[in-house]
Image (spheres, grey):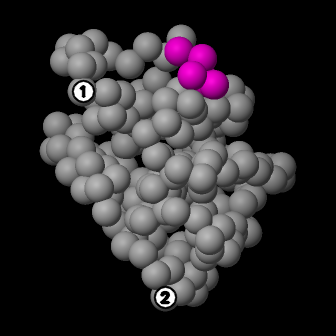
Amino acid sequence: MSNRIQCFPSLFNEHSKILILGTMPGVESLDAKTYYANESNHFWDFMYRILQPDYPAYQPFDFDTPREERYQFLLSHGVALWDIIKDCVREGSNDSKIADPTFNDITGFLEGKAIKAVLCNGEKPLIYLRRIGQLQHIRIPVVKMNSTSSLNPNNTFIALEEWQHQVTRCLNL
């Protein structure tokens, strides 16, 4: 029997305009105690390319960048992070292996905050929002994005373009 795993605390401040909603951190992220720590995940590469206009075109994200620096980078650009699942049982990192989840109160979290949109990192967060009845109570746009996971079969350049369009649009709401 596997032990229950827990998500990280939400990452946000009073200037956050976008909530990027994941499912549950993977094993590498949980071990590193850092959102999106798996180097094959495109999340940090996408965020730096989108939010830092002078980011070198052919330079992959440097995963030696300290967690606090990454987090401050997102917060300084109005981006918040959290996960729909509060805790669950899961073997490995694949969302398809999630069992017995309990959920975070995303609707309650959004109340009174300056967040203007929720970007779901992949389809699963949106599925869970619907399943648990929270989606109908969220009064801001909720957008399903191509997952930044390397397991996403879609073209990475198309996914980056989609993320760039939506992040830029939502930061300007």
Secondary-structure class at tag 1: loop
Which quadrant of the figure has residue 50?
top left
For label 2, the crowd category at 10 Å Cα-Cα, with few meaning under 14, some 14 to 19 and many 20 or more, is few
**Direction from residue 92 to residue 52 in the image, left or right:** left
- Could you tell me if the residues under marks 2 and 1 are in contact, i.e. CB atoms within 8 Å? no
3D distance between C-alphas at marks 2 and 1: 35 Å
| Residue 68 drawn in magenta | yes
Q: Residue 144 location in percent, x, y?
A: 34, 64
In the image, 8 versus 168, the foreground residue is 168
Residue visible at 53% across and 27% down? 70
Q: Residue 59 location in percent, x, y?
A: 27, 13
| Residue on which the image places disc 2 | 136
**Direction from residue 149 to residue 6 in the image, left or right:** right
| Residue on which the image places disc 1 | 53
Secondary-structure class at tag 2: helix
| Residue 99 drawn in magenta | no
In the image, 163 versus 123, the foreground residue is 163
Indicate whether 128 appears above or below 79: below
Which quadrant of the figure has residue 122?
bottom left
Q: Residue 156 location in percent, x, y?
A: 22, 38
Q: Residue 57 location in percent, x, y?
A: 19, 18
**Residues shaded magenta:** 65-69
Which tag, 2 or 1, sits closer to the chain's start?
1
Q: Is residue 42 shown to the viewer in this render? A: no
Residue visible at 37% across and 43% down? 148
Q: Is residue 129 shown to the viewer in this render? A: yes
> For the residue marked with disc 2, what is the amino acid?
Gln
